[in-house]
Each structure stands twice: as C-alpha cells, then as structure tokens.
Amino acid sequence: MSPTKLAVVGAAGRMGREIGRAAAASKAFRVVAAVEHTGSPAVGEDYGRLCGLEATGVTVGTDPGAAARVADVMVDVSLPEAFDGVLTAAADQGVALVCGTTGLGPGQIARIDQEAERIPVLYATNLSLGVALLGELTARAARVLGADYDIEIVEAHHRGKRDAPSGTALTLAGRAAKSRKIDAGSAVVHGRSGRSEGRPADEIGVHAVRGGSIFGEHTVIFAGDDDRLELTHRASSRALFARGALAAASYVSGRPAGRYRMTDVLERLGAP
C-alpha cells in the first residue's frame, strides 16, 4: 500500500515540525506539502531541513489550495486566522482535514459542520489519544457520581499559550455538563475572585495556569463530601500530539464526508 499523502499547515510551528518528524519516521505517510503564513521566515525553506531532518524536496509555501491539490489529507495546526482558508481549500478539493487549532470562534465551528457535508473533517481541541480517553472517563464519572460531586477543572500550559482556558479544558467541561444534563454555557465559571455566595451544585469551575515550558496538563476533580476523584493527563512532550494527529489523519483519509472526533479514533484502536 502506498503511503498517505500528507499536507501540514502551520508547518514551521512547534507542532508542525513535530508532525513532520513523526511522519518521516512512519512508513504510512509521505509529506507532500507544507504551508505557512505569508511573511513567515520559513517560506521557501525545505520542510525536512526545517524539521531537523534530511532535505525532502518539499518547499514551505503559503497557498493551502495548492497543498490540498496534491494531498490525501491535510493536518492544520496553525492559527484561527488561517483556519477559514484551510477549510475552504480542503472542501473545494475534496480532501480530508484534521484540525487541532484551538481558539476557533462559534462561526468557524459552524463552518466545520457545514463543510463536513462535503468532506471528512476531524476537529479536536487536543489531538492526544490520552486526552480523548480522559474525555470519555470524565463523561462517565460525571454521569455515575451525579450532582453529589462538585466538578472543577484545572489546566496548565507554557507561558506562550495564547488562549485561556485551553480548548481542551472547555471540551472536558462540555463533556461533564452533557452527562449531568446541564447547560455548559451557564454552568462554567472562570475564577471566583470577590464572590461571597456559596457554590451551586450545577457549577463547573475551570481554571488556567500559565508558566514555564509546561506542555499541557489537565485535571478533572470530582469532589464529594467524603472523597475526591481526580482524573489527570500530563503531556511530557509534543511527540504524543503528533502521533495523535497522524492517527487521526490515518482514520479520516478515504472516509465518507462527515464530522469525526478523536473518540472515533479511540474506537478504531479498541478503546472501551
């Protein structure tokens, strides 16, 4: 079987380069295009060299449409400002898309559902398979433990992360809220400075920590009167996100149009 042709958007970023290294180590993928924003110093460079590897002959460009024309699947780990152009390029060319870009607005999320009628799209606020499993466990714990347990979510990332709280933390809050049959929009609270009233049972606290070079940590706390359950995922390198991105790319490539999630990838791997 010939390798899956992969286009990486956000190629010069830390995640983009990590995906390039993971793809090079895999016989299942061949990077055929790398995309960066206009003005990036990486434009015109060899993508392999950019990743600290041997030259590949793939030059970093700026046109997602050109990348989509030669790829089987695109992986977007760029910025929200670039997302609309990437999604349009993939949909117009009928190419599968994996997007791990965080900070997308409601209108952009709505566009994913719209274009998923034309192409397979997998969008995840976190491409780690471990975090996907954390989401499943969070949903189950929220359902089983019920309203007797208060839910608090604490996330920590490096000082350079732009969005807070993380998209992953909000996704976890959404999974917990759905299991509790409460509205996540009104249940989630960010910080409690100056508040004197007690904590209502249907509240979900979400707290962000920023500092140093923390790759990413998420803890979901279920606090009862007599015990406390904590579910934690700690990333120790970006390589795990790159492996998850490639697992997602392998999953969606060649699939029918539709909206896919990392939980679908878990099921393929045999997770409960």
Image (spheres, rainbow, N blue to C red):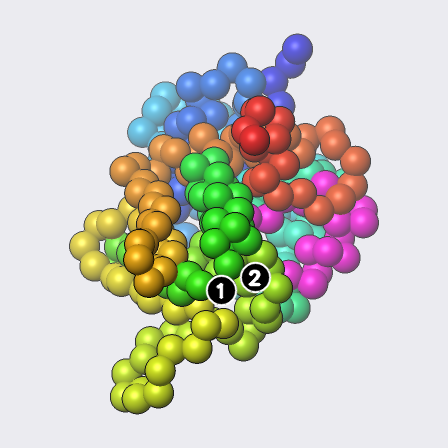
Height in image: 114 above or below 55? Answer: below
Q: Quadrant of the C terminus?
A: top right
State the residue at coordinates (40%, 65%).
150
In the rendered view, does 109 fall on the left or right side of 163? right
* Residue on which the image places disc 2: 180
Q: Are marks 2 and 1 in contact (CB under 8 Å)?
A: yes
In percent of width and height, residue 32 lies at 57, 29
In the rendered view, does 229 fall on the left or right side of 213? right
Height in image: 98 above or below 145? Answer: above
- Where residue 248 sits, quadrant-wise, is top right
* Residue on which the image places disc 1: 147
Q: Quadrant of the N terminus?
A: top right
In percent of width and height, residue 213 lies at 22, 50
Tell me the CA gap for discs 2 and 1.
7 Å
The answer to which of 248 and 228 lies nearer the viewer is 228
Q: Which residues are magenta?
A: 109-125
Looking at the image, tell me whether mark 2 or mark 1 is earlier in sequence order.
Answer: 1
The answer to which of 165 and 245 lies nearer the viewer is 165
User: Is residue 6 something one can see in this rendering?
Assistant: no
Q: Is residue 155 magenta?
A: no
The answer to which of 32 and 234 lies nearer the viewer is 234
Look at the numbered disc 1 and give the secondary structure of its residue.
helix
